[in-house]
Image (cartoon, helix red, strand yellow):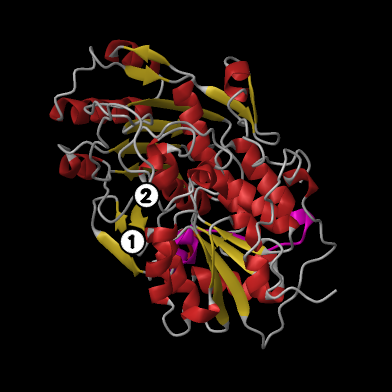
Amino acid sequence: MARMTRREWLGRSLLAAAGAGVAAAWPRPAGGQVVGANEAVRVAVAGLRTRGLQLVDWFRKVPGVRVAALCDCDTQFFAPALKRLGDAPEKVATVNDFRRLLDDKDIDAVVLATPNHWHALQTVWACRAGKDVYVEKPVSHTLVEGRKMVEAARKYGRIVQAGTQNRSCTGLRAALAWLREGHLGPMKLVRGYDYPARQSIGKTAGPQPVPDTCDYNLFQGPAPVVPLRRKNLHYDWHWFWATGDGDAGNRGVHTFDHIRWFIDQPDVPPRTVSIAGRFGWDDDGETPNTQITLFDYRPVPVLWEMQTLPKRTRPEHLAKIRGLAGSMVIECEGGFFSGNRGGGTAFDRQGKVVKPFRGDGGVTHAANFIAALRNRRTGDLAADVREGHVSSALCHLANISHLTGRPASPAEIGKAAAGSDLLSESFERLLEHLKANEVDVGRTPLTLGPALALDVKTERFVGEGAEQANARRDRTYRSPFVMPEEV
């Protein structure tokens, strides 16, 4: 039989008649291809909006890498991406269905900047098809998905890098080494905070039109195909539970990741409690815009705060939590370190600068992935998929506590938080933030999540509230976009 040309192959739909069992029947190669030291690594970038375009730039600048394909279910994004590759656009394939990349022998690795609800399924499919994967944060949309991604990477011997590039930042790496040398003494606690300036996404009066350029069936993928109830199809999917994880998964996961890295915690926390709500906006969004979560790591507990309303008491808040140079403040016996992507600063107990650490924002993260892809050493990855899984799990834990919570008055929450000085102090800041934005918590009550206990090895909830919480460890997939039971 004559070999099919690339153009002919790309013109066909790999899964035109796909059924419910397609994912489970995906090819299982005995071993992945190995790229020689002098061969170009051919990557496909999937998801071509802002972050995808940034990744196109990152990977095209890595020596020995060729961006060979672009994938997006909305064809309007091909032109800007091709413009970035203007040296030879005729050599770049454009594909609207990710599944068409999987049997393409011209693709060595896929780079995923798709919405959250697609990450795990695309990663598992790619591993089974013998491709390496760079996947944006959060790597998963559920706790179970993250574990399956790790299993697939190990089973098929694939290199899978999480897009939490803070671990590649030279400044943070230097700061971590310096702190572990003991210059500020033992770590006592960590505060993480994310205060992005957000606006309401608006409220629709009915179903909204999907752009003519977009295949909405592919956009939703494993999520239900429901009428579009937001004005902006793209990006605002973050604020809906079927496709996104709120700012815990959008911003918080970066903060969780470098905190875990610094306190050297390889697993999920044994207990999590969240206080949250969506305030000040009468819009179509579902996820919290204000949230505090305590991750009860021992011996170094972690508190995370997220505030997004426009009238913020940010300067006062940052002064109280010493947030002088980033989204992570590590309190130590002899001082504190405040930092983020790009570096940070160490201070003594009186707030005097001890040592600055200037970083590069992790710009070598893509190159680190390619180097590990070539030498096939998972240990060389700055952010292996398991690290991405555990850090993503923290955002899921925060949200599960919220989703299984109940409306409560400030007095009730204050009483519940009284057992933790850290949580009580953070709750007072949350109330100040809401008051500054004229939020009446009587009319729009806060949600007090339960303190959920977790078996850190099985990542299953135990104790009070476990049944309800465990029901949220995974989700239902829409055929044929189904996660296989056995990867």
The numbered disc on residue 328 is 2
Q: Residue at x 60, y 64 (%)?
A: 110
Establish if 396 lies above or below 98: above
Q: Report the span colored magenta.
A: 154-175
Residue 274, x across and y down, in percent: 42, 27
Residue 396 belongs to magenta span? no
> Left of 410 or right of it: where is 160?
right
Tell me the crowding category of disc 2: few under 14, some 14 to 19, or many 20 or more residues within 10 angstroms, Cα based: many
Residue 355 circle label: none
Q: Is residue 80 visible?
A: yes
For the point 29% across and 11% down, which residue is it? 411
Q: Position of residue 286 (x, y in %)?
A: 37, 29
Residue 265 lies left or right of residue 248; in this view the side is right
**Residue 28, above or below 284:** below
Q: Secondary structure at mark 2?
A: strand
Rendered view: 126 above or below 226: below
Q: As rendered, which of 110 and 36 lies closer to the eye?
A: 110
